[in-house]
Image (cartoon, helix red, strand yellow):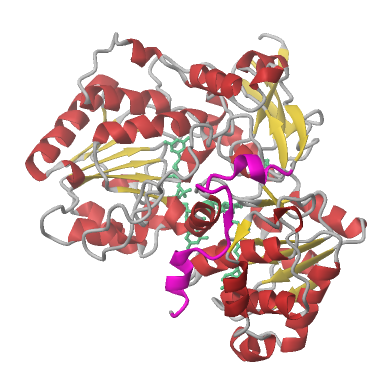
C-alpha cells in the first residue's frame, strides 16, 4: 500500500462550486471534506459531495459501451460502437434530411469542463437544428431577459448576496437547492449573514419552504401571479417618486414606457389575483426602497411558469429602477476569468425565432428548441420528422414536461444513442449507451457557474484518478463521433486538442490574462484564487448595439395582453 495522499478539487454536483479536500490511498477514497483553504467556500460542503465516491465505486455504473439486443444488453467495443452509430446517423440523415437527427443535452453537461467545451463542435458536426436541452425546462426566461435587455443571453445579473441589506426571493428555495443562477457555496450561511448585519430576507412562495422558514417574512402567493406582484411593486416605486437609476441615468432606455405600463397595476387592483393584500405589497416596496441596498432574486418558481418571461424581465426592471443594479448589494454582473462573452460583439443579432418547431411553431433560442416539443416532433409524421435521437447526460423521460410521452416517442425511434453513465428511464430506449468517465476521474473547471457566481474566483481541479485503458471521457466520445461524422482522420491536428489547451488559451486571453492568469497559475494554486467581490462593470460588459439597457423590450410588450 502506498501512503495516504490529499487531493483538492471543486465539487461539480451542483452550482455551488464548493472546494473539497479528498484523502485517498492508491485508488481508494478515504474521506471527502470541505476544503478550509478554498477562498470561496471556506470549508463548506454538503452531504451530496460524498456521492463523488459513490459514482466512482458504484457497481451499477456503466464503464464501457453496451448495445441493446433482442435478448438483452451486450458489451461492445468502442470502435464497433462508434462505427455503428455514425453509419446509422449518416444513413438516417441521407434518407430523411439532417434534421431527422435530434440532440438532447442534460444538466451534467453544464458541470463538466470537457462537455462544456466540446459540445458546440459536436452539435455542429451533426448538422441538425433539432437541438434540445434541460435549459428550456428550467432557466430560459433568464437568458431571454438578458438577451433582450443587455444584449447577450449569458449576461445574467446575480444577487450580491454578501453585501445586500434586503433580499427578496421569488420562487426559489436555496436552503434546499443550494442556490441556482446564483453560485454561492454555503448559501444558508450567506443568508444568515444578511440577517446578522441587520438586513432582511423576504420570500414569496406558494409553499412554506425551508427557505421561507429562515426568512424574516414569507408572503404566500397564488401560483403564476408573480408578474402581477412585480408590476405592483414597480407601480409603488413610481408612485412614491423613488425611481433612482444612479450611475445608469443615461444608460437606460424605456423608463417612461415602463411608468405608463405600471400605472395600471396598483397593489389595490392586483391584490385579489395575487393573493397578497395591498398593504403588504406597499410595505414590501417601501422596505425594499428604505434599505441601503436591496435585490430581488427570482428563480425556478418564477421562471418555469406561464409568465416566466415577464417575471424575469420585471425582476430586472425592479432592481434597476430602485437603484440596485450594477452596484454593491444589488444585482450585478460577474466578471469570470473564462469569459464566455469574450468574442460576443455588441449588437450581435440573437438567434431568437431564427427557426420554428415544425408542429407547434415555437421559437428557436440560444441554439435550441423547447424540450416540451420533442415528443410531438418525433411522433407527428411528415417532412422533417425526427427519427433518431442522441441524449448526452440527460434523463428527459423523468425530467421533461410530459416525460411519459417522450418514453413512447423514444420507443418508436429508428435509432437512439445515449452518452450516459447509467441504464435508466431514458437510456433504456437507446440502441447503444456510451458511458464516459465522471466526477473524480475528470479534470474540472466551472465555465458556466463562474459566470453566475456571487464572487469572482477561479479554480482548476485535475483528475484524481487516471482513466482506465478501456474508458473514455465524455469529451473524447463526443470528439470521436464528430470526427467520424465529418470523416476527419484520427491523426488530424485538431483531434489532439484537449480541454486543458482551450482552458489555458481562454484564461490567457480573458480579463485577467494580463495579470498572468493561466492554467499553470491555477495548478500552482490548488485551493483556488480569489479575485474579489463583484464590481460594477455594466458599461464594459453590456452587449447591446447602443450600450444601453433596454428596459422595455418588444417581446414583453407583445406578451402583456396575454
Ligand atoms: N417534475 C420536475 N421536473 C423537473 C424539475 C423539477 O423540479 N420537477 N427540474 C427541472 C430542472 S431545473 C432541470 S435542470 C432538469 C434536469 O433534467 P436532466 O438533465 O434531463 O435530468 P437529470 O436527472 O439531471 O439527468 C442527468 C443524467 O445524466 C447522467 N449523468 C450523470 N453524470 C454524468 C456524466 O458525468 N456524464 C454523462 N454522460 N452522464 C451523466 C445521469 O445518469 C442521468 O441520466 O429537470 C427539470 N425537470
Ligand atoms: N438536492 C438537489 N438540489 C438541487 C437539484 C436537485 O435535483 N436536487 N437541482 C438543481 C437544479 S438543476 C436547479 S435548477 C435548482 C433549482 O433551485 P431553486 O429554484 O432554488 O429550487 P426549486 O425547488 O426549484 O424552487 C422553486 C420554488 O418555487 C416555488 N414555486 C412554484 N410555483 C411558483 C409560483 O408560481 N410562484 C412562486 N413565487 N413560487 C413558485 C416552489 O414552491 C419552490 O419552493 O436546484 C439545484 N439543486
Ligand atoms: S452544495 Fe453543491 S457543490 Fe457544494 S458540496 Fe453540495 S453538491 Fe457539491
Ligand atoms: Mo435546473
Residue 328 in sight here: yes
> On the image, which quarter does residue 142 sit in?
bottom right
Q: Quadrant of the C terminus?
A: bottom left
- Which quadrant, please, contains the N terminus? top right
Considering every residue shown, the one lying at the far left of the view is 95
Q: Which residue shows up at 62% across the image and 44% down it?
A: 452
- 170 sits to left or right of 558: right
Residue 240: quadrant of the picture: bottom right
In magenta, the rendered stretch is 536-561
Residue positioned 87% across, 61% down in the render: 199
Q: Nearer the viewer, residue 39 or 505?
A: 505
Tell me what residue is drawn at x 58 percent, y 65 percent: 254
Judge from the rendering whether residue 510 lies leftward or rightward of residue 278; answer left or right: left
- The answer to whether residue 251 is left or right of residue 168 is left
In the foreground, 151 or 389: 151
Q: Nearer the viewer, residue 291 or 432?
A: 291
Q: Residue 79: x, y in percent? A: 25, 20
Can you tell which quarter of the image residue 409 is in?
bottom left
Name above or below for residue 10 compared with residue 97. Answer: above
Q: Is residue 149 magenta?
A: no
Res. 216 in view: no
Indicate the position of residue 364 as horizontal and vertical percent values: 34, 54
Amino acid at each position: 500500500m502506498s501512503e495516504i495522499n490529499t487531493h483538492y478539487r471543486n465539487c461539480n454536483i451542483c452550482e455551488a462550486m464548493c472546494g473539497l479536500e479528498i484523502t485517498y490511498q492508491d485508488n481508494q477514497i478515504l474521506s471527502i471534506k470541505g476544503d478550509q483553504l478554498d477562498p470561496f467556500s471556506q470549508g463548506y460542503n454538503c452531504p451530496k459531495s460524498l456521492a463523488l465516491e459513490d459514482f466512482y465505486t458504484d457497481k451499477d455504473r456503466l464503464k464501457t459501451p453496451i448495445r441493446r439486443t433482442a435478448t438483452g444488453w451486450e458489451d461492445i467495443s468502442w470502435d464497433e460502437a462508434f462505427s455503428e452509430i455514425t453509419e446509422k446517423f449518416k444513413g438516417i440523415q441521407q434518407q430523411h434530411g439532417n434534421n431527422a437527427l435530434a440532440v438532447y443535452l442534460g444538466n451534467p453537461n453544464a458541470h463538466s469542463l470537457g462537455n462544456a467545451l466540446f459540445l458546440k463542435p459536436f452539435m455542429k458536426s451533426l448538422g441538425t437544428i433539432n437541438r434540445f436541452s434541460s435549459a428550456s425546462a428550467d432557466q430560459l426566461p433568464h437568458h431571454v431577459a438578458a438577451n433582450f435587455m443587455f444584449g447577450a443571453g449569458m449576461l445574467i445579473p446575480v444577487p450580491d448576496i454578501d453585501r445586500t441589506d434586503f433580499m427578496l426571493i421569488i420562487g426559489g428555495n436555496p436552503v434546499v437547492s443550494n442556490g441556482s443562477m446564483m453560485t454561492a457555496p454555503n448559501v444558508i450561511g450567506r443568508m444568515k449573514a444578511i440577517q446578522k448585519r441587520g438586513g432582511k430576507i423576504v420570500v414569496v412562495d406558494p409553499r412554506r419552504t425551508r427557505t421561507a422558514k429562515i426568512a424574516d417574512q414569507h408572503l404566500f402567493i397564488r401560483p403564476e401571479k408573480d408578474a402581477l406582484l412585480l408590476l405592483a411593486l414597480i407601480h409603488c416605486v413610481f408612485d412614491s417618486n423613488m425611481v433612482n437609476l444612479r450611475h445608469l441615468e443615461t444608460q437606460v432606455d424605456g423608463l417612461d414606457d415602463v411608468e405608463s405600463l405600471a400605472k395600471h397595476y396598483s397593489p389595490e387592483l392586483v391584490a385579489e389575483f395575487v393573493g397578497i393584500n395591498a398593504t403588504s405589497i406597499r410595505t414590501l416596496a417601501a422596505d425594499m426602497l428604505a434599505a441601503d441596498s436591496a435585490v430581488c432574486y427570482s428563480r425556478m418558481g418564477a421562471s418555469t411558469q406561464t409568465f416566466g418571461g415577464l417575471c424575469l424581465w420585471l425582476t430586472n426592471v425592479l432592481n434597476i429602477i430602485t437603484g440596485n443594479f450594477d452596484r454593491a448589494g444589488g444585482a450585478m454582473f460577474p466578471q469570470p476569468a473564462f469569459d464566455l462573452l469574450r468574442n460576443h460583439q455588441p449588437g450581435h443579432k440573437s438567434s431568437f425565432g431564427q427557426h420554428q418547431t415544425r408542429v407547434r411553431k415555437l421559437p428557436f433560442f440560444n441554439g435550441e428548441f423547447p424540450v416540451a416539443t420533442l415528443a410531438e416532433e418525433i411522433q407527428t409524421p411528415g417532412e422533417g420528422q425526427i427519427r433518431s435521437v442522441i441524449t448526452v447526460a440527460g434523463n428527459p423521460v423523468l425530467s421533461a414536461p410530459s416525460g411519459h410521452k417522450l418514453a413512447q416517442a423514444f420507443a418508436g425511434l429508428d435509432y437512439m444513442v445515449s452518452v450516459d453513465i447509467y441504464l435508466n428511464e431514458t437510456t433504456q430506449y437507446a440502441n447503444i449507451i456510451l458511458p464516459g468517465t465522471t466526477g473524480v476521474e475528470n479534470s474540472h473547471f466551472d465555465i458556466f457557474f463562474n459566470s453566475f457566481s456571487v464572487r469572482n474566483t477561479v479554480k482548476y481541479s485535475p483528475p484524481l484518478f487516471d482513466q482506465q485503458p478501456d474508458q473514455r471521457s465524455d469529451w473524447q466520445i463526443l470528439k470521436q463521433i464528430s470526427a467520424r461524422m465529418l470523416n476527419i482522420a484520427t491523426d488530424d491536428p485538431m483531434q489532439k486538442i484537449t480541454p486543458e489547451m482551450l482552458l489555458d488559451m481562454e484564461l490567457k486571453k480573458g480579463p485577467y490574462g494580463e495579470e498572468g492568469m493561466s492554467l499553470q497559475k491555477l495548478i500552482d494554486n490548488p485551493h483556488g484564487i480569489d479575485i474579489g467581490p463583484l464590481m460594477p462593470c455594466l458599461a464594459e460588459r453590456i452587449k447591446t448595439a447602443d450600450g444601453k439597457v433596454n428596459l422595455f423590450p418588444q417581446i414583453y410588450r407583445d406578451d402583456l395582453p396575454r
